[in-house]
Image (cartoon, grey):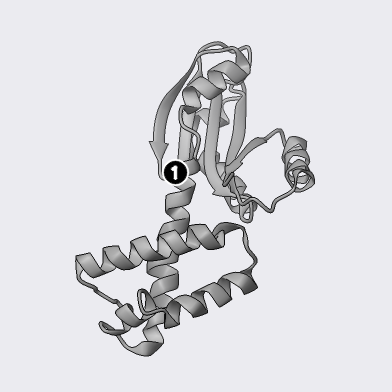
Amino acid sequence: MRVTLPKNVEKSIKDYVFKLADKEDYLSTSKIDNGLFIDRLVSDTNAGKKVEQYTKKENVRTYIKDAVLNRYTKHCREKNKPQGLEEFFSLMFNDKCHKIESSKNTTLLRCSSKASYTHIISVDGTYAKWETALRKALLYSGIKPFASKVENRILIHLNLFTPKHVTESDKMAIRKALQIIGAKCDFYGMT
């Protein structure tokens, strides 16, 4: 099911839904509340009813969820994501760190001296799927030649997007779990 809308209609729906999602605090509410929000959007004349003019009624909910609200979530993550990993780690370890490579949601940095870590693998993820971010970092390190050299000290760092409702004790539990394996994480998100 591929729904194609005229660009101006697509933009007006996106802008409208983004504004409502901000107002509803979409990223910080429960799945049940989000489901109710999507139901309201499906029957809204400025959202679902407009989409319905270009596709079957049974495709409207999927379009709003997948094409609009998923894009909203990515937009919010990017907008709130901290910038300047090189500066962040340089300050953290009092060592000059340089970005070696960067791909989708994964950045590899190298530190100048051997005082702290030689390499840092930083992966973006979400609080809800922090295990997926950790798995991605572990698999990434497994395919890189530097990881097999014993003299290299590697830090796995997770940069996790967090909705407002996550408590400090929830964050501390993840920090402690990661500390056991020598990994670290930082949280960012909606304020």
Looking at the image, residue 76 lies above or below residue 41: above
Report whether residue 1 is seen. no
Report the residue at 37% width, 88% height from top.
57
All told, the count of numbered labels is 1
* Residue 11 shown left or right of residue 167 in the figure: left
Please tell me which residue lies in front, 88 or 101.
88
Please tell me which residue lies in front, 165 or 84.
165
Report the residue at 41% width, 79% height from top.
44
Q: Secondary structure at mark 1?
A: helix
Image quadrant where residue 184 sits: top right
* Residue 45 shown left or right of residue 143 in the figure: left
Please tell me which residue lies in front, 164 or 4.
164
Q: Residue 119 appears at what percent x and percent y?
A: 54, 25
Please tell me which residue lies in front, 166 or 120.
166
Q: Mark 1 — residue?
A: 79
Can you say which quadrant of the picture contains the C terminus?
A: top right
Image quadrant where residue 99 sits: top left
Q: Residue 142 appears at what percent x and percent y?
A: 54, 41
Can you say which quadrant of the picture contains the N terminus?
A: bottom left
Say which amino acid is labelled 1. Answer: Lys
* Residue 118 shown left or right of residue 170 in the figure: left
Looking at the image, residue 158 lies above or below residue 45: above
Report the residue at 56% width, 59% height from top.
25
Q: Residue 10 appears at what percent x and percent y?
A: 27, 67
Report whether residue 42 is seen. yes
Report the residue at 64% width, 52% height from top.
131
Disc 1: CA contacts within 10 A as few (<14), some (14-19) or many (>=20): few
Q: Residue 50 appears at what percent x and percent y?
A: 31, 79
